[in-house]
Amino acid sequence: MTSLSDIARRAGVSPSTVSRALAGSRHPVSAQTQARVERAARELNFRPNLMARGLATSRSQILGAIVHDISDPYFGAVVRGLEEGARAGNYHLFVCGSERDAIRELAQVEALMSRRVDGLIFTGGGIDDPVYQRKLRRVLADYRRQGGVVVQLAPAAVPARRIEPDNRGGTEMVVRHLTELGHRRIGYVTGPAHIRTSAIRLDGFRAGLESAGLRCDDRFLAGGDFSVDGGAKAAAELLRRGLGITAIVAANDVTAFGVLDELDRRGINVPGDISVAGFDDIEAASLVRPRLTTARIPIAELGRAGAEMTQALLAGKRPRSVVLPAELVVRDSTGIPPRRR
Amino acid sequence: MTSLSDIARRAGVSPSTVSRALAGSRHPVSAQTQARVERAARELNFRPNLMARGLATSRSQILGAIVHDISDPYFGAVVRGLEEGARAGNYHLFVCGSERDAIRELAQVEALMSRRVDGLIFTGGGIDDPVYQRKLRRVLADYRRQGGVVVQLAPAAVPARRIEPDNRGGTEMVVRHLTELGHRRIGYVTGPAHIRTSAIRLDGFRAGLESAGLRCDDRFLAGGDFSVDGGAKAAAELLRRGLGITAIVAANDVTAFGVLDELDRRGINVPGDISVAGFDDIEAASLVRPRLTTARIPIAELGRAGAEMTQALLAGKRPRSVVLPAELVVRDSTGIPPRRR
DNA sequence: CTGAAAGCGCTTACAG
DNA sequence: CTGAAAGCGCTTACAG
């Protein structure tokens, strides 16, 4: 592996000068020397060792992202945005999956800290668990003390700068859409119980019902986990309860896909018999049939903005936390309730 | 930031000993010392600086993966498998998107090399472009010379150990399925022209037709790019040509979704009027309507196996390249051709 | 089993 | 504008 000193020798200058010429230092270098060094570097195919540079500068130029599930299309889109934003600022991106597990998430944070990532980005909702939160809080305090910054692109379980979608408002909008269509018996499939996002979207659901003068009966709630399977099972459960439901709101699109699938399997027409709505507006939402009504979040933009906010923090700026509005997208999966049941 | 020497001081031993105690060295350490060091490390909340370790050992314990598009569900699943496999071997994973662009891919490879990743994994098909290939070949030679290993989870454009799905055989199977149903006029939507995978799947398509005694007319081919939009446009193009097509095979599922969407928009019944099939069997394939007939690849397993092969190579083993068989999954999007046109 | 020393490949005050 | 020197935080022969 060719190193700085190899270039130095070939260019007939000192390693210090090579470093300054190649690493874009603010220290002046004569045009002639600059050219000679660049030439030598090119000829020797020099690739600076970024671990060495990182050690010397105590800046890794790496951003660490923790996602709940890398194969979930929502996180895929977020990561895409993050990568764009990171690349634009000359950062690399580490992606770690937590599987929404507190232990694993802590392990990933520790690992990222050992890699000395400059910024930590939590892309999913925080985990509601006091023990975990206490530990995380302590670890992040350490991290900040050493100069790290942390950003969360979802409701946080510990203090952190945030860019988050309007989970509550978005869900309320979806519910309002349904109540305005005339629905009164609306079921809800939650997200995983221990994730903050789930709680907030559920709040939105309740608020939506209330503002339509409806009360929220717990029997209309079924537990999901942001997966297709979870959605299908929850839909089955809601039907089993025989509540005369005319609409089902799912905590996210993926869950809604499971609901649609289960209803289809049972020959229940959507939206003729039951309306279905989701949350997120991932690409597949307009590919399923019927096309899914949902609350749209600008997912990739969320990622890009997250990377930018992280870099702003690293640059010493004080960006404010922001809430991104959700937008109702009405497609074919919602309609007026059936005449009578 | 607390370092090895801090621990050493607190435990009353030398940094060398701390290193040996904490990094799982094969060098013996007395049980007593071991305990004292571990205690000190715990008390001081020690997190070893992996950049420093990497610099000293010239092993980063990082695997670098290059994907065509991180938000594509296929690559999402591959990355998930890769991460599992990497974690199992105590490696971290860097993920970089190339957008199927030769320039950007080369830049990502260079970046990963600068990070001194131990292994390089190309997850998508190689790019068919002589200039790019020459450059890549040279860069990879450098990389291997410095101890790096490279694995490709798809048809490679340059020499590399591979684990690849049976792209040709899988496509042939899909075509055979259609010809056995009675289809004779079958359209094909290709993948991006410069990607090797596209060429091989197209070969499979042609071979499938031939073995059914049909000849492949280029008018039945339309160019796609592995995107929904590309699939939709290609379907429109095929219809515009008025060839009396009764089936469309798409180079991948995502493309097939676009085809389905376009046909639906035009009120063309699938599979009543036209059958549609894809390739990959990503999760969404069974969520669209009609459910998509496709050739299944064990995507996440491919990723896991890729990470394992990379580690095997790093351990000095000589694993053999393997082809993973594809499996025909018949769902609702294919059926017998309509009586007459 | 333990430690002192050199080295990994960079950067950056400091001196000139 | 250039260079010598020290340092970043580890590991690992080498000596004992």
Image: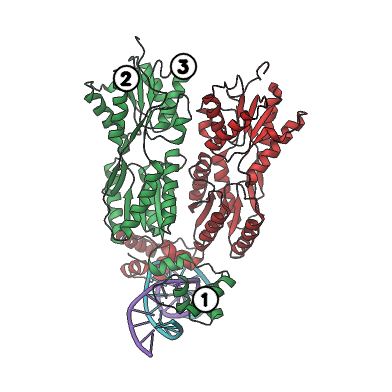
Chain colours: A green, B red, C purple, D cyan
List x then y, in percent, for residue B203.
70, 39
**Mark 3: secondary structure:** loop
Q: Chain of mark 2?
A: A
List x then y, in percent, for residue B290.
54, 24
Q: Chain of mark 1?
A: A
Residue at the limit of the structure toward the top, as seen here: A340
**Among numbered discs 3 and 2, the one appearing first in the sequence:** 2
In 3D space, how far apart are the residues under numbered discs 3 and 2 (Cα atoms)? Answer: 24 Å
At label 3, the amino acid type is Arg
Q: Is there any visible trace of residue B28 in the rendered image? A: no
Rendered image: mark on residue A181 = 2
> Eyeballing the image, is A85 above or below B291?
below
Residue occupied by mark 1: A35
Q: Residue at x 42, y 27 (%)?
A: A292
Neighbours of disc 1 within 10 Å: few (<14), some (14-19), many (20+)? some
Q: Are marks 3 and 2 in contact (CB under 8 Å)?
A: no
| Figure disc tally | 3
Q: Residue at x 35, y 28 (%)?
A: A223
**Mark 2: secondary structure:** helix
List x then y, in percent, for residue B133.
64, 56
Rendered image: mark on residue A266 = 3
- Give the mark toward the camera: 1 or 3: 1
Left-right relation of A277 to C9 = left
Q: Residue at x 65, y 18 (%)?
A: B338
Neighbours of disc 3 within 10 Å: few (<14), some (14-19), many (20+)? few
At label 1, the amino acid type is Ala
